[in-house]
Amino acid sequence: MAIRKVILTERELTNLIKKIVRETKETEMEESWLGDKLSDIGKGGREFFTGHKSRGDRDSKRDQFMEDLDELEEMFNENPDDFMQSDWGRLRSRLEREAEENNYKGEIVVLGKSKKVVKYEPGYSGLQHMGAGAGSGMRSSHTFGSGGRGGSLG
Protein backbone atom coordinates (compact mmCIF):
# COMPACT_ATOMS: atom_id res chain seq x y z
CA MET A 1 0.00 0.00 0.00
CA ALA A 2 1.44 3.35 -1.05
CA ILE A 3 1.44 6.30 1.33
CA ARG A 4 0.09 9.50 -0.18
CA LYS A 5 0.89 12.96 1.08
CA VAL A 6 -2.18 15.23 1.14
CA ILE A 7 -1.82 18.97 1.58
CA LEU A 8 -4.84 20.81 2.98
CA THR A 9 -5.38 24.45 3.73
CA GLU A 10 -6.41 25.40 7.26
CA ARG A 11 -9.98 25.99 6.03
CA GLU A 12 -10.16 22.62 4.24
CA LEU A 13 -8.87 20.80 7.33
CA THR A 14 -11.39 22.58 9.55
CA ASN A 15 -14.22 21.68 7.17
CA LEU A 16 -13.07 18.06 7.03
CA ILE A 17 -13.06 17.73 10.81
CA LYS A 18 -16.48 19.40 11.03
CA LYS A 19 -17.80 16.94 8.46
CA ILE A 20 -16.41 13.98 10.42
CA VAL A 21 -17.94 15.26 13.64
CA ARG A 22 -21.28 15.88 11.93
CA GLU A 23 -21.31 12.40 10.37
CA THR A 24 -20.45 10.71 13.66
CA LYS A 25 -23.31 12.52 15.38
CA GLU A 26 -25.74 11.58 12.58
CA THR A 27 -24.88 7.89 12.67
CA GLU A 28 -25.17 7.88 16.46
CA MET A 29 -21.85 6.17 16.89
CA GLU A 30 -21.73 4.11 20.07
CA GLU A 31 -19.96 5.82 22.91
CA SER A 32 -16.37 4.84 22.64
CA TRP A 33 -12.97 6.40 22.99
CA LEU A 34 -12.94 7.51 19.34
CA GLY A 35 -16.44 8.98 19.54
CA ASP A 36 -15.50 11.00 22.62
CA LYS A 37 -12.34 12.31 20.96
CA LEU A 38 -14.17 13.36 17.79
CA SER A 39 -16.78 15.27 19.75
CA ASP A 40 -14.00 16.99 21.74
CA ILE A 41 -12.43 18.09 18.47
CA GLY A 42 -15.77 19.54 17.41
CA LYS A 43 -16.02 21.57 20.62
CA GLY A 44 -12.54 23.09 20.62
CA GLY A 45 -11.62 22.70 16.97
CA ARG A 46 -12.43 26.23 15.90
CA GLU A 47 -10.09 27.77 18.46
CA PHE A 48 -7.37 25.23 17.66
CA PHE A 49 -7.51 25.97 13.92
CA THR A 50 -8.31 29.70 13.86
CA GLY A 51 -7.05 30.97 17.23
CA HIS A 52 -10.55 32.27 18.11
CA LYS A 53 -13.37 30.53 19.99
CA SER A 54 -16.04 32.08 17.79
CA ARG A 55 -16.64 34.77 15.20
CA GLY A 56 -17.72 37.08 18.03
CA ASP A 57 -14.42 36.44 19.83
CA ARG A 58 -12.53 37.42 16.68
CA ASP A 59 -14.67 40.54 16.27
CA SER A 60 -14.07 41.59 19.88
CA LYS A 61 -10.30 41.15 19.43
CA ARG A 62 -10.49 43.24 16.25
CA ASP A 63 -12.44 45.94 18.11
CA GLN A 64 -9.89 45.91 20.95
CA PHE A 65 -7.07 46.18 18.41
CA MET A 66 -8.73 49.22 16.83
CA GLU A 67 -9.23 50.86 20.26
CA ASP A 68 -5.55 50.27 21.06
CA LEU A 69 -4.60 51.73 17.70
CA ASP A 70 -6.71 54.86 18.32
CA GLU A 71 -5.15 55.29 21.77
CA LEU A 72 -1.69 54.93 20.26
CA GLU A 73 -2.58 57.51 17.60
CA GLU A 74 -3.49 60.00 20.36
CA MET A 75 -0.11 59.37 22.03
CA PHE A 76 1.64 59.84 18.69
CA ASN A 77 -0.19 63.10 17.94
CA GLU A 78 0.66 64.50 21.41
CA ASN A 79 4.39 63.72 21.19
CA PRO A 80 5.47 62.63 17.69
CA ASP A 81 9.14 63.12 18.59
CA ASP A 82 8.87 60.25 21.11
CA PHE A 83 8.46 57.75 18.25
CA MET A 84 10.99 56.39 15.77
CA GLN A 85 8.36 56.30 13.02
CA SER A 86 7.52 59.73 11.64
CA ASP A 87 4.55 58.98 9.37
CA TRP A 88 1.53 57.88 11.43
CA GLY A 89 -0.68 57.13 8.41
CA ARG A 90 1.85 54.72 6.98
CA LEU A 91 2.47 53.09 10.36
CA ARG A 92 -1.26 52.69 11.02
CA SER A 93 -1.95 51.10 7.63
CA ARG A 94 0.97 48.67 8.14
CA LEU A 95 -0.27 47.66 11.60
CA GLU A 96 -3.83 47.20 10.32
CA ARG A 97 -2.62 45.08 7.38
CA GLU A 98 -0.44 42.87 9.59
CA ALA A 99 -3.24 42.39 12.13
CA GLU A 100 -5.76 41.50 9.43
CA GLU A 101 -3.35 39.02 7.82
CA ASN A 102 -2.82 37.45 11.27
CA ASN A 103 -6.60 37.29 11.89
CA TYR A 104 -6.22 39.63 14.91
CA LYS A 105 -4.53 36.96 17.03
CA GLY A 106 -1.58 39.16 18.01
CA GLU A 107 -1.10 42.52 19.67
CA ILE A 108 0.52 45.92 19.28
CA VAL A 109 3.87 46.18 21.05
CA VAL A 110 5.61 49.45 21.93
CA LEU A 111 9.34 49.10 22.59
CA GLY A 112 11.72 51.65 24.04
CA LYS A 113 11.43 54.58 26.43
CA SER A 114 12.96 57.66 24.84
CA LYS A 115 12.35 56.73 21.20
CA LYS A 116 9.45 54.30 20.97
CA VAL A 117 9.23 51.67 18.23
CA VAL A 118 5.76 50.35 17.42
CA LYS A 119 5.27 46.91 15.89
CA TYR A 120 2.67 44.19 15.57
CA GLU A 121 3.52 40.95 17.35
CA PRO A 122 1.65 38.10 15.60
CA GLY A 123 -0.29 35.48 17.55
CA TYR A 124 -0.62 31.82 16.62
CA SER A 125 -3.34 29.18 16.61
CA GLY A 126 -2.80 25.76 18.16
CA LEU A 127 -2.34 24.31 14.69
CA GLN A 128 0.37 26.85 13.86
CA HIS A 129 2.18 26.06 17.13
CA MET A 130 1.99 22.35 16.38
CA GLY A 131 3.29 22.86 12.84
CA ALA A 132 6.14 25.03 14.05
CA GLY A 133 7.14 22.36 16.56
CA ALA A 134 7.06 19.64 13.92
CA GLY A 135 9.04 21.78 11.49
CA SER A 136 11.60 22.54 14.16
CA GLY A 137 11.98 18.85 14.93
CA MET A 138 12.51 18.02 11.27
CA ARG A 139 15.12 20.75 10.85
CA SER A 140 16.94 19.46 13.92
CA SER A 141 16.68 15.85 12.70
CA HIS A 142 14.88 14.89 15.91
CA THR A 143 12.38 12.40 14.59
CA PHE A 144 10.88 9.31 16.09
CA GLY A 145 10.79 5.98 14.33
CA SER A 146 13.12 4.68 11.72
CA GLY A 147 12.86 7.61 9.34
CA GLY A 148 15.60 8.32 6.86
CA ARG A 149 16.51 11.56 8.62
CA GLY A 150 18.16 10.03 11.64
CA GLY A 151 15.30 8.62 13.65
CA SER A 152 16.16 8.80 17.33
CA LEU A 153 14.32 5.64 18.35
CA GLY A 154 14.90 3.34 15.46
Image (cartoon, helix red, strand yellow):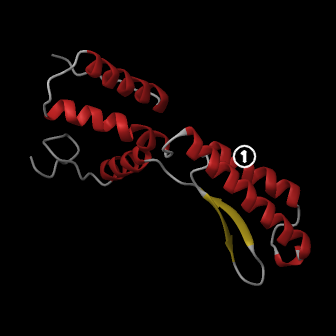
Judging depth in this view, the residue of 105 and 81 nearest the camera is: 105
Locate residue 6: give its quadrant: top left
Q: Which residue is mark 1?
A: 97
Q: How many marks?
A: 1
Judged from this view, the residue extending furthest toward the bottom is 114
Q: Is residue 83 left or right of residue 139?
A: right
Name the residue: 49% across, 51% down. Answer: 124
Write the residue at 72% across / 46% down. 97
Residue 29: image quadrant is top left
Label 1 residue SS: helix
Instruction: From the top left corner, tell me how far across and down residue 110 is, in percent.
Output: 69, 71
Q: Position of residue 72 (x, y in %)?
A: 78, 66
Q: Residues within 10 Å of mark 1 (few under 14, many from 20)?
A: some
Q: Is residue 5 visible?
A: no
- Spot occupied by residue 66 in the image (x, y as percentages of width and height): 74, 54
From the image, which quarter does the N terminus lie in? top left
| Residue 130 on image: x %, y % | 36, 47
Q: Is residue 136 above or below residue 18?
A: below
Tell me what residue is drawn at x 22 percent, y 22 percent: 3
At 20% across and 18% down in the image, what residue appears?
Answer: 2
Residues 99 and 134: in front is: 99
Q: Amino acid at mark 1?
A: Arg
Query: Is residue 53 in sight in this rendering?
Result: yes
Q: Quadrant of residue 121?
A: bottom right
Q: Nearer the viewer, residue 55 or 87?
A: 55
